[in-house]
Every structure is written in structure tokens, then in C-alpha cells.
């Protein structure tokens, strides 16, 4: 993704907060927690393929889910009024997620970039390249979690 | 290849559909319930765009999520041993989901087809065509829910 496309995409994320503004905070938080779970499933599935028998179709499926959700306008699931609250469980988003827009854009942009690249590499079927790129996606996940997710107390 | 090797190889293929077979049923059920939520979010967001101000980027984002998840190998989240149990809540999958493979393939195939078409139509930016195709995706969702989801008692 070129810089201009990235800026356009991120602007779209910023503007997207309106469409579902009336939806209850509890549902918005459930949705974003669900996206994280689906991304977790996709990462776990790719990892299992890298460490076990490599199945290209499975890796492509999961990489495509990561790509689509990474580029899916997740910012719209963090509207004002959802800083605290419970979806499936108490929100784990730190207050800074709602105030530090520049850093959010930075970590989201990094995740988009690495997820897009993973989808490309997965389609090639090159397991070694997938393994390397999978590591970069994991780092991008961690980059956001370290900054914006409260430490898991469960 | 000797017979024994062949059997080992084929077993590996068969097992590959269960790359995450060792994951706890509770987590598998959470994952599939989360996929349903993410699809619900995507449908709600497209609906809001159809009924309100139409934003092509938002619709493309959500249609791409529907497409990627529809084609994402969801069947692997319904392994034996998860017929009953609790993820975020008690599973709403009917027993037939685990026994009527032909019907599962039929409704899943219909959903894949309509979701793929929606992603195509969304990319065109034709709001009227999106509205029509959105209705078909909704019917495909309902086709599966009617057959395989227990009635919502919540």
C-alpha cells in the first residue's frame, strides 16, 4: 500500500465512526473483542500450519481473514462512550486508545502493512516466507497490545 | 510409496483439517461465536450505509470481511467434541450441524457464493446493486440459521 492509499484508508477509518453510532456500547465492545478473537484464531491456525503439516489453503484462508479485518475499519469500533464498559468481558482498551490518535494510526498502519504482505506471501505458498512474515505480523499485533491493551488479568 | 507410508500420508491430510484439534472446546466455541459476531457487525454496517449516507469504503471493508470469513474454513471450528459446551455463551449450534454434512455444505456454499458476489458488487460502488445483493447474503445467513441454529432464547 502506498502512502497516499494508507492515508486515505486511515481517514476512512476516522470518518467511519458515524454509521453505527447508535449501537449500544456493549455491542460495540463485543464486536471489537470478537474481531480480536477472530484474528487470534487466524494467527493460531497459521502457526499450527507452520509448526505442523503445512496446508496452503488453510494458511490462505486465515491470512485473508487477517487482511480483511486489519483493513476493515476497526477504529469505528472504538467510538466515544466505549472507553469503559463490558462486552464479552470488561474492555481491555487503555484510555490512550481514545486520545492518542497519532499512535493509533501508527500501530494500525503497521498491522495493515504486515497483514497485507502476509496475504500476498500466503498466496505464493512459500512456507518459509510465510513463517518469516508471520513473525512480522505477530510483532505488529504486539506493538498495539503493548501500547493500548491493559495487561491481561484473567 | 509403500502402503504404510501412504496411510500415514493420508492420515496427515485428514488431520490437517483439524490443525487446531487440540485447542479446548471452549476456545473453539468462542472463536466460532466471534466469527458470527464479526459477520453480524459487517452486515449491520453495510445496512447502515444502505439506509443512511452511503460510504463506498466502509461497504467495501465490511464486504471484504464477509467474503474472507465466509471462505475462511469455518467448518474447522465445529470439530467433534464441541456439539455442546460454552464459549461466550452456550453453543447455539444444533446437533444436525455435526451430522448433516451434505446440508452444511449446501448452506455454506450458498453463503460463500453470495458473499463473494457482494464483495464484487461493493467494489463497483453501485449502491443499488449492493442493496440487492445484501438481501441475498441476508437470505443465505438465514438459510443456515433456520437449519442449524437453535432459536435464540436470550
Image (cartoon, coloured by chain):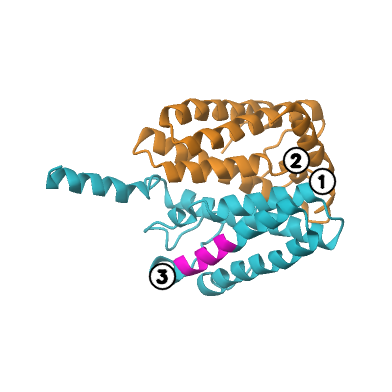
Chain colours: A orange, B cyan
Q: Which residue is mark 2?
A: A75
Nearest the camera: B73 or B109?
B109
Considering the numbered disc 1 on the image, is that residue within a helix, a strand or a loop?
A: helix
How would you rate the neighbour count of disc 2 (Cα within 10 Å): few for under 14, some for 14-19, many for 20 or more? many
Q: Which residue is mark 3?
A: B102
- Location of the C terminus of chain B by quadrant is bottom right
Rendering coords of residue A32 (x, y %): 67, 46
Q: Nearer the viewer, mark 2 or mark 3?
A: 3
Marks 2 & 3, CB-CB < 8 Å contact:
no
- The residues colored magenta run B105-113
The answer to whether residue B107 is magenta is yes
Host chain of mark 2: A
Mark number, residue A17: 1
Rendering coords of residue B58 (x, y %): 76, 49
Nearest the camera: B80 or A96?
B80
Host chain of mark 1: A
User: Are tags 2 and 3 found on a single chain?
Assistant: no
How would you rate the neighbour count of disc 3 (Cα within 10 Å): few for under 14, some for 14-19, many for 20 or more? few
Amino acid at each position: 500500500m502506498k502512502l497516499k492509499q494508507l492515508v486515505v484508508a486511515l481517514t476512512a477509518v476516522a470518518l467511519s465512526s458515524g454509521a453505527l453510532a447508535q449501537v449500544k456500547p456493549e455491542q460495540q465492545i463485543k464486536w471489537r473483542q470478537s474481531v480480536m478473537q477472530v484474528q487470534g484464531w487466524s494467527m493460531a491456525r497459521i502457526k499450527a500450519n507452520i509448526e505442523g503439516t503445512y496446508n496452503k489453503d488453510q494458511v490462505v484462508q486465515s491470512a485473508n481473514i487477517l487482511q480483511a479485518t486489519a483493513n476493515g475499519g476497526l477504529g469505528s469500533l472504538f467510538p466515544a462512550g466505549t472507553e469503559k464498559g463490558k462486552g464479552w468481558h470488561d474492555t481491555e482498551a487503555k484510555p490512550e486508545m481514545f486520545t492518542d490518535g497519532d499512535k493509533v494510526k501508527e500501530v494500525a498502519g503497521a498491522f495493515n502493512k504486515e497483514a497485507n504482505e502476509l496475504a500476498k506471501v500466503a498466496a505464493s505458498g512459500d512456507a518459509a516466507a510465510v513463517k518469516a512474515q508471520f513473525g512480522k505480523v505477530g510483532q505488529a499485533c504486539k506493538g498495539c497490545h503493548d501500547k493500548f491493551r491493559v495487561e491481561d488479568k484473567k
